[in-house]
Amino acid sequence: MASHIVGYPRMGPKRELKFALESFWDGKSSAEDLQKVATDLRRSIWKQMADAGIKYIPSNTFSYYDQVLDTTAMLGAVPDRYGWTGGEIGFDTYFSMARGNASVPAMEMTKWFDTNYHFIVPELGPSTKFSYASHKAVSEYKEANALGVDTVPVLIGPVTYLLMSKPAKGVEKSFSLLSLLGNVLPIYKEVIAELKAAGASWIQFDEPTLAMDLDSHQLQAFSDAYSELESSFSGLSVLIETYFADVPAEAYKTITALKGISGFGFDLVRGTKTLDLIKSSGFPAGKFLFAGVVDGRNIWANDLAASLSTLQVLEAVVGKDKLVVSTSCSLLHTAVDLVNETKLDSEIKSWLAFAAQKVVEVNALATALAGQKDEAFFSANAAAQASRKSSPRVTNEEVQKAAAALKGSDHRRATNVSARLDAQQKKLNLPILPTTTIGSFPQTMDLRRVRREYKANKISGEDYVKTIREEINKVVKLQEELDIDVLVHGEPERNDMVEYFGEQLSGFAFTVNGWVQSYGSRCVKPPIIYGDVSRPKPMTVFWSTMAQSMTARPMKGMLTGPVTILNWSFVRNDQPRYETCYQIALAIKKEVEDLEASGIQVIQIDEAALREGLPLRKSEQAFYLDWAVHSFRITNCGVKDTTQIHTHMCYSNFNDIIHSIIDMDADVITIENSRSDEKLLSVFREGVKYGAGIGPGVYDIHSPRIPSAEEIADRINKMLAVLETNILWVNPDCGLKTRKYAEVKPALTNMVAAAKVLRTQL
Ligand code: GLN
Ligand code: ZN
């Protein structure tokens, strides 16, 4: 029985690649140094998989930046502005596309399906010239071969590549990217021929777009592409790999009908319906089924007994020698190696499996299917599964009951938003176009050091409070000088908007090395939600009331919302996501109520990541939005009319989910907007009825550039043309944490000046 891994993280168990890249970019080390780190990482990964007994080991899943950019390089599809003149693409051109250079900005980056991984979006048009310009796939194959490891080279499939691209600047938006299929296939043919000549016996084409809602034209592209490639496949076995969701029935039919393909890979973790589809529609005789039963998107140990029975069902359908045990998707989206987790206790550790452990699980399942079950490994796994089910650390009956009681009922504030805004205005007495900021103020090195030292018990609690109090005071005084209307305390006590709350809630664990690549050299370390979530004691009241005591102006209480906490964590898989979300919502609700009881009149509950959790398939989106929005409302359904609830979101492309956002029923929403006024405002121009307060960011905080008062006033005027004067707020795009005071002070000065000038004209 064979085993297969779809792909593996590149960063290294201790983010070795990150440090090598950043040192190279800073000019502190040479290209050879960087290549050496990369070679060592690849070697150890291949060796690890070979030692574990994996039969189909991937190559070309390493990347210096991004696998989609690697494909762009392979196809020679370098946008003209990078001045590439041909030949093999080197670091210069490659990293210029990824990160920009002194004279040219980087290519655009966007989320890879519904993961937190970001890829570099190819820019294509009718005049794009394709040529075989990066031989990386072949050289990685050869490199592994020289180490004695026969690998399966992985390529992003031609259809997914084109569907993930965007029309280049100046090309009509309606340009059909799929019309380029005939231009890219010759390059794919060259790559295939070269891989074959190098000795490859299998090639894997990743075509995750097959799990999306595709129209017949797009599905036809798969038939066209792979029939065109069929002749190059002779003498080769070819795997089409899908992941991240169920493959819809039509797509399943299309691909399983393809000739010349030897195997199909499916995500059986997220794609629960695929199993039924395979059982009911059948599976083409003589082909391999790569069954993705080990979750590549999470950090939980596999329930091996359950997977084994799934595999046995499949075995009966496809035949014993045609079933391959695999991961649900590339392990890129999970943490690297549990071995380096020195701070987790052994009980929690026994519940987890990172990429290195998942490789072992895949192999254990394959050998078990082949009749050589490693009894000790399976029984240790069963014991860990049982301990996770029964551990008192996981289950908190009170929380379970409270969350269960929420179901079926709605949670809304009793009064409608315009009446509430009136009641709040009587109390808050704000000018029209009130000014505020999103929460964080610049985080200096000193601040970071103090937090670190306090955590490491190197400074006393007293000294810590004193330093943070001084910082808050500084931020409060600055805002008063700037004459901002609704103040923030600046969040100096927070390292990260999710971690800060996770550390104080029960049911959360934190890793030391559980990094996952987000983009390029950037990684995130999501908290692990392993148990029922509760709030043992207030989390923010101490700092918020301290800040409020320093000023007569309203001070916003600052919280992270339940959906964002959920979407930026590794979430337990033993109950539906919405249940975990409701639990977090109840914990945040308690915090909201404590803040209100301590005299805080404005409370902001950030839902920066609400959109990120949106399922890929349209048929599942309404359900998600329903429970996500409900969770948000739970947090604040109990407050008085006079308490003003704000929320903040880090994106402006909400045209398609505007009704859900309205349904959150916040009093005021601040949103990122700097790069797309028009898009945002068009929603309102189209007549969407919107009565709550709204603050579309008036300047971009991602850039050090300082906007002038005129420019800000101009933008506010554009908004005023579409939105009622009495609902518009004036604020930056997002938190100011990554900016310097030298930028923040003049920018906010101009922002307030713009608001004041406009007030006199209205
Ligand atoms: N309140 C947070 C801050 O200002 C919001 C950050 C975010 O939206 N990502 O930092
Ligand atoms: Zn934001």
Image (spheres, helix red, strand yellow):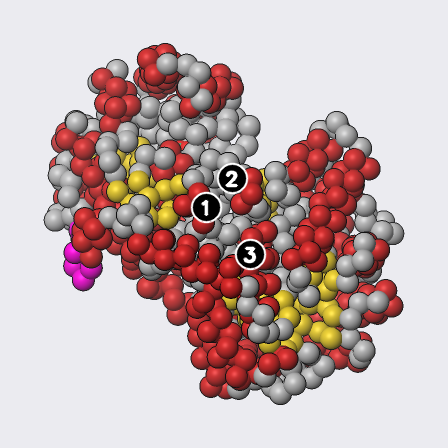
Q: Position of residue 599 (x, y in %)?
A: 16, 27
Label ID, residue 349: 1
Note whether residue 399 is visible: yes
Quarter the N terminus occupies: bottom right
Sequence order check, earlier mark of 3 and 1? 1
From the viewer's perspective, tell me whether residue 54 is left or right of residue 389: right
Q: Quadrant of residue 713?
A: top left
The answer to which of 760 and 11 lies nearer the viewer is 11
Helix, strand or loop: magenta stretch = loop
Viewer-proximal residue among 342 and 641: 342
Q: Is residue 319 above or below residue 567?
A: below
Q: Is residue 255 magenta?
A: no
The amino acid type, in three-letter code, at marker 1 is Lys
Q: Quadrant of the C terminus?
A: top left
Compare marks 2 and 3 and give the one earlier in the sequence. Answer: 2
Q: Quadrant of residue 539?
A: top left
Disc 2: which residue? 341
Secondary element at image label 2? loop
Residue located 18% across and 62% down the image: 408
Label 3 – label 1 distance at C-alpha = 13 Å
Give the alpha-carbon distance from disc 2 to disc 1, as whole Å: 8 Å
State whether residue 444 is above or below residue 607.
Answer: above
Range of the magenta residues?
405-412
Q: Which mark is residue 358?
A: 3
